[in-house]
Image (cartoon, helix red, strand yellow):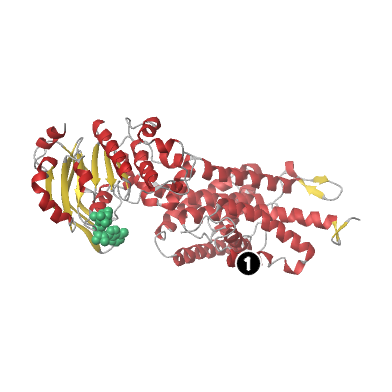
Amino acid sequence: MILIFGVPIQALTGQLMVGLINGAFYALLSLGVAIIFGMLRIANFVHGAQYMLGAFVAWFLLNLPNIFPGLGLPTIGYWVALVLAPLVVFGVGILIEFLFIRRVYDLDHAYSLLLTIGLTMVLEGAFRLKYGSSGQPYEIPELLKGGRNLGFMFLPYYRVWVVVVSLVVCFATWFMIERTKFGAYLRAATEDPILVRAFGINVPLMLMLTYGFGVGLAGFTGVMAAPIYQVSPGMGQNLIIIVFAVVVIGGMGSILGAIISGFFLGIIEGLTKVFWPEASNTVIFVIMAIILLVRPNGLIGRVAK
Amino acid sequence: MHDVFATQTTHAGAGGAAMLEIRNLEAWYGESRALRSICLDVRDGEVVTLLGRNGAGKSTTLKSIMGMMRKRAGSIKLYGEELIGCASNAIARKGIAFCPENRGIFSSLTVAENLTLPPIVRDGGMSEEEIFDLFPNLRERLNTGGTKLSGGEQQMLAIGRILRTGARLILLDEPTEGLAPAIVQQIGRVIRRLRERGLTVILVEQNFRFAETLADRHYVIENGNVVDSMTNAEVPANRDKLAAYLGV
Ligand SMILES: Nc1ncnc2c1ncn2[C@@H]1O[C@H](COP(=O)(O)OP(=O)(O)OP(=O)(O)O)[C@@H](O)[C@H]1O
Ligand SMILES: [Mg+2]
C-alpha cells in the first residue's frame, strides 16, 4: 500500500475527488451569489432554497405520473430536467425579483438580508410541510452510471460529469460577463446604473434578468446535485452558509474569485478530512476569518462600493 | 451661419419650431428643491449654453431633460412630444445623449467597451473612425482600462462615445472643466464640427470666454430659475451684467 504523509493514497485521492465535487457545487452556487451581489448589491440568502427548488423540480418531473395520477403524464428524466428545471427556477426568480427584490434595491442592506432570509424560510417551510425532512431519492441517469477503476482510485462517471459541467458553465458565465456586450452593460450598470440607463439601456429589465439568471444557475446546480445528495427541503440550508463564506473569500461580487475559491475550498475541505477530520467542518470559516483580516476585499476583490 | 441663427432667435420662445421646449421645470433631490421654474427653448441646430454660478441648477437641468432626476415636474417637449414621465432609457432612444460632469467613464470597462457602450439610437451617428479622427489619442488606447486614461482623454472618450449613437440633441456638462488650454481648444473644434453636422447642443459652461466662441444663445440660471437669456451677438453689450451674474 502506498502511503503519502502516512495516509493511504486511495483515501487521499478519494477525498480529493469528494473535495473536487463539493468544490464544483460551491463554485456554481457562489457564482450565482457573486453575480447577484455584484450587479444588484443584494446578498441573496434565498439562493440555497432556490437550489433546493431546482432539485425538487427535477424530482417532480421524474415523478409526474405519481404526483398527478390519472392524467397520463409522462415521466421526465434527468436530461430534460437539466434544461427545464433551471428555466422554471429562472421564472420563479424573475417573479421574486418583480414582487419583492426590486423594492429593496435602494434600501439598507439589512432589508434585503431580512427579505431573502424570510423568503428562504417560506420556501423551505412549505416544502418541509409537504415532504418532511427526509430526502427523496433521485437516480443517476443511465448514461452516467458506473465508473472506472484507475488502480489507485475508483472514478464514478457522474462525478466526472459534474466537475466538467461545472467548469464549462463557470467559464461560459465568466466569458459572458467579462467579454460580451451584454456583460459590458452589466459591469457598467454595477458602477453607475443611472448613467447606463440614460444611454438608453433598460437597466431595471437587465437587473431582473440578471437575478433570474443567478437564480436559474442555483436551480441548475440543484438538478446536478439531485443524484448525488438526496432531494430534501433542507439540502440548501447548510450549503448556503458555506457558499457565502466562499463568496466572501473570493471577494464579494467577484466572478472569477467565486469560481476559483469555490473549487479551491472544496479541495481544501476534502484534504482536511484526510489529515485532520475534526477540523473539516470549520476549515472554510477559519480561512474566511483569516482572509477578512488580511484582505478584507477577498482574494480577487473588485472593490465593493 | 452664426448670425442667421442669432437673428432668428432673439427672444426665446418667439416663433420658429423649437426642438426642445421646457416650461416650468421643477426638480428635487429628496426633499430639497434644486429647480424652481426653468423655462427655455432650443431650436434645431443651435448651440445653447447654460451659464450660472456653482449650485445654480445647470447640471440638474440637463439631468432632468435626460430623465435622470427621480422627482421632477413641469413640461419638457421634444418636437412637441412630452418627456416628463418617460423613463430615461426611453428618452435616450428618442435621440438625446448626455455627457455628465464627472465624465462617467467606467473603470471595469476598457476604452473600447466604454466607447461602444451607448447603443446606437438613430442613423447618422459618427463612425468609430470619425471619432478617432476627432480624438486621435483614443485610437492607441483601446485596450486600456477606461479610468487609466488621463483626465483630458477621459473627457474625449465621454464625448466620443455619445457621438456614435446618432443622437440629435447633445447635452454636455462642463466638458472643459480642469483641462489644459490645448485640449479645451480641441473640444471647441469638436463642438463646432457637431454644429456643422446639424446637431443641436446644450452646453453647460463655467468658462464663459470659451462658451462665447461657440454658442448661438445663452441662458443664465440662478437658484433654479432662468433669470436671463441673450443671443451671442448681444453679449458684448451685456458683459458687465453677465460678469455680475457669474460672479467673475
Ligand atoms: N446629488 C445631490 N443631492 C442633493 N442635492 C444636490 C445633488 N446634486 C446637486 N444638488 C443641489 O442642487 C442644486 C443644483 O445643483 P447643480 O448640480 O444642478 O448645480 P450646477 O449649476 O451644475 O453647479 P456646478 O457649476 O457646481 O456644477 C444645488 O443646490 C446642489 O447643492
Ligand atoms: Mg454642475
The answer to whether A211 appears left or right of B103 in the picture is right
Give residue B242's position: percent from left, percent from top: 13, 51
Give residue A179's position: percent from left, percent from top: 52, 41
Seen as rendered, the residue at the extreme bottom is: A278
Q: In terms of depth relative to the viewer, which is nearer, B48 or A22?
A: B48
Q: Residue A23 lies in what quarter of the image? A: bottom right
Vertical comparison of B26 with B165: above or below: below
The answer to whether B159 appears left or right of A85 in the picture is left
Number of residues whose C-alpha sits closer than 10 Å to that of mark 1, classed few (under 14), some (14–19) or many (20 or more)? few
Image point 41% across, 47% down: which residue?
Answer: B150
Give residue B240's position: percent from left, percent from top: 10, 52
The answer to whether A10 appears left or right of A93 in the picture is right
Q: In terms of depth relative to the viewer, which is nearer, A107 or A221?
A: A107
Seen as rendered, the residue at the extreme right is: A1
For the question of whether residue B131 can be seen, the reply is yes
Image point 58% across, 66% down: which residue?
Answer: A292
Callout 1: SS = helix
| Tag 1 residue | A290
Give residue A51's position: percent from left, percent from top: 59, 55
Q: In terms of depth relative to the viewer, which is nearer, B47 or A254?
A: B47
For the question of whether residue A73 can be seen, the reply is no
Could you tell me which quadrant the N terminus of chain A lies in?
bottom right
The answer to whether the residue bearing label 1 lies less than 8 angstroms from the nearest atom of ligand 1 is no
Image point 11% across, 40% down: which residue?
Answer: B233
Q: Amino acid at mark 1?
A: Ile
